[in-house]
Amino acid sequence: MTMIACPTCQKKTEWSTDNVDRPFCSAKCKLIDLGEWASESYAIPQQTSDEEEIFSGTLESDPNKSFL
Ligand SMILES: [Zn+2]
């Protein structure tokens, strides 16, 4: 049996196929981790705006946008 530390609360939990929330100790910790991950991605607006600028710039300079 393999014991792992829950990434959210660091509680030791058994790595088992019976644990559908692994590597988290519970569904609650899984949701907390997913929520933090989502808010972290929102906290990086620089990267997102750069990608949007490149994308829109490509569309505007695309001579093949006849579908519009
Ligand atoms: Zn946990």
Image (cartoon, helix red, strand yellow):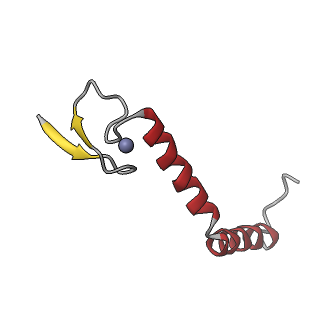
Query: Does residue 56 appear left or right of residue 18 in this picture?
Result: right
Figure check: 11 above or below 40: above
Query: Does residue 8 appear left or right of residue 63 in this picture?
Result: left
Point out the residue furthest to the right here.
68
Instruction: List x then y, in percent, for residue 18.
Output: 27, 24
The image quadrant that residue 52 belongs to is bottom right
Residue at horizontal 21 percent and vertical 35 percent from the top: 14
Residue at horizontal 64 percent and vertical 62 percent from the top: 42
Front-most of residues 23 and 57: 23
Quadrant containing the C terminus is bottom right
Count of numbered marks: 0
Residue at horizontal 62 percent and vertical 67 percent from the top: 43
Figure check: 58 above or below 65: below
Instruction: List x then y, in percent, for residue 8.
Output: 40, 50
The image quadrant that residue 12 belongs to is top left
Instruction: List x then y, in percent, for residue 23.
Output: 31, 42
Figure check: 60 above or below 1: below
Front-most of residues 55 and 43: 43
Quadrant containing the N terminus is top left
Point out the residue furthest to the left here.
1
The image quadrant that residue 56 belongs to is bottom right
Quadrant hosting ligand 1: top left
Residue at horizontal 85 percent and vertical 57 percent from the top: 66
Figure check: 7 above or below 43: above
